[in-house]
Image (spheres, rainbow, N blue to C red):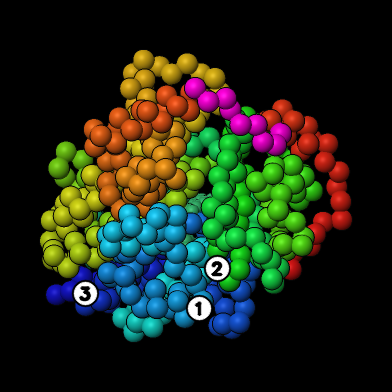
Amino acid sequence: MKPRIVILGGGIAGLAAAIGLVRRGYPVALIERDPPPPADEDLDPFLAWKRRGVPQFRLPHGFSARARTLLAEHAPEVLDRLRADGIEEVNVFKTFTPAEFVRPSDDEFTVVWARRSAFELALRRCAEAEPGITFLCPELAGGLSFAQGEPRVTGVRLADGREIATDLVLDCGGGRSRTSRWLAAAGVHVPADTQDCETVYFSRYYRFTPGCALPRNAMLLRGELESLMYIGFPGDHDTFGLCFEVHPSEEDLRPLRNTWAWEAAARSIPDLAPWIDPANATPLDGIQIMGGHHNARRYFVVDGRPVVTGLLPVGDALCTTNPAYGWGASMALTYAFAAAEAVAAHENDPVAMALAYDAATATEADAVYRESAAMDRARIYRITGQEVPEHDRAEMERQRLIAEGVAAGVLSDVELSRAFCRRINLTGPADAVINNPDLVLRAKDNLRERAARPPVESGPDIQRLREIVLTAEPTLESSPA
Ligand SMILES: Cc1cc2nc3c(=O)[nH]c(=O)nc-3n(C[C@H](O)[C@H](O)[C@H](O)COP(=O)(O)OP(=O)(O)OC[C@H]3O[C@@H](n4cnc5c(N)ncnc54)[C@H](O)[C@@H]3O)c2cc1C
């Protein structure tokens, strides 16, 4: 008999898992606390879709090439929908690499340029078109039910007290999913590794003014002023996001939450100034702020046994990485389709299902967690001036080689550029970027060259930026369109 399946959470992982399961012949009920997207397709979902359950909904997202490849393989109509919605597919590697060096396999670096709202809407509409998916939405899940005396999930309790009996729950509740707490209350411990990302986002989306001549590729900007990093995110429908990521100890930069201080900071940085010039772009909304980011890896299989059956953690509920690296959505899709596969392979054997899912996902979840946490430690040691402890030195050297040695070759060395693109796009294992000894030598040469070159000063230093932010005067804000 087919298992009764409930998906808890209808974000990226939940929608993809629902599509993956229904395609394999499993009807599902999907519980999502937020309301559905507005029916009026003319409304911009970025502003019109109310997503309290996804605090990052209006914060910048870039979708790695892995996400596009997974959709092409498992749910191509999501890509069709994105295309029909006018969303661009872009291969920056191919754009910047001389044609004679481009190989057919470089198509693997093609990405979609979309805001989170457009990407998720495409997934949602495709899921809605599936008669096998029943949406319980808006509906808040408030707990789980368990079999008497054994760690086996038998139902989901809704916040209003109703219960939905089920054989399997896919926990797609995101990084803030309450499932681990519900399990703990039932005596089931889910071990976890966590590491604070120590970063706060202050971001804003804009729309290009018609006829704006700024080259869209140049939007992929990234720069660092000690404790502050800035990143540009190309979006859909002539939009783009700009984000400051700031270390939480930077009290003087907290006024960045105010439009006038944020704009003063952006105006003072030559890379950013043209993008916020009212002649070129108009803001879509106010400053979006989000802190409290953590890397987290939760272990639902310990010593070769599932800690609970009837429950598979999918997406951020299984593993969360620092959003700055842009891996979360593609890993959510990876886990979602792997979960559907494990269900299909072991529909009536919950232990075998949990083990198969773990076998399909654990190595990669471990790798992205390790890499994300290590990149964060490298940044945190640098910003806080802490001495790198002995046990972390080799790893920090490795991270430096990737972040500086490999990245420095992106525009001058096709193989280093490919290695770099593979890492950021997760088209190969996250930790494999410098496994090739020849590339390691070239990356080391780059490090030596960099060290010998005087730093290029452009724009304010961090102390000057603090002053600019602290002294920025409230102005008549450029109001969102
Ligand atoms: C600031 C920020 C920027 C990011 N930028 C990027 C990026 O550039 N690229 C990238 O790939 N990733 C990025 N990410 C990560 C990405 O957003 C996540 O990895 C991805 O959304 C994970 O998908 P998910 O489905 O697991 O969780 P979510 O997308 O968070 O979805 C969880 C869903 O579960 C619902 N839910 C939760 N609890 C309940 C409940 N009790 N009852 C009912 N419904 C519930 C929520 O409402 C929500 O819809 C970013 C994250 C943040 C925080």
Q: Residue at x 56, y 82 (%)?
A: 41
Q: Assess whether mark 2 and mark 1 are in contact (beta carbons under 8 angstroms).
A: yes
What label sits on residue 236 in the rendered view? Answer: 2
Q: Residues within 10 Å of mark 1 (few under 14, many from 20)?
A: few
The residue located at (45%, 55%) in the rendering is 96
Q: Earlier in the sequence, mark 1 or mark 3?
A: 3
Kind of residue at disc 3 = Arg
Q: Position of residue 83 (x, y in %)?
A: 45, 76
Q: Quadrant of the N terminus?
A: bottom left
Q: Dots 1 and 3: beta carbons under 8 Å?
A: no
**What's the amino acid at mark 2?**
Asp
Image coordinates for residue 442, horizontal then vertical, percent: 33, 33
Distance of mark 1 from mark 3, alpha carbons? 27 Å
Depth order, front residue of 199/54: 199
SS class of the residue under badge 1?
Answer: loop
For the residues labelled 1 and 2, the Cα–Cα distance comes to 9 Å
Mark 2 lies on a secondary structure that is loop
Q: CA distance from mark 3 to mark 2?
A: 31 Å
Residue labelled with disc 3: 24
Q: Which residue is mark 1?
A: 85
Q: Which residues are drawn in magenta?
A: 452-460
Give x and y (percent) for residue 292. Answer: 54, 41
Residue positioned 61% across, 74% down in the render: 44
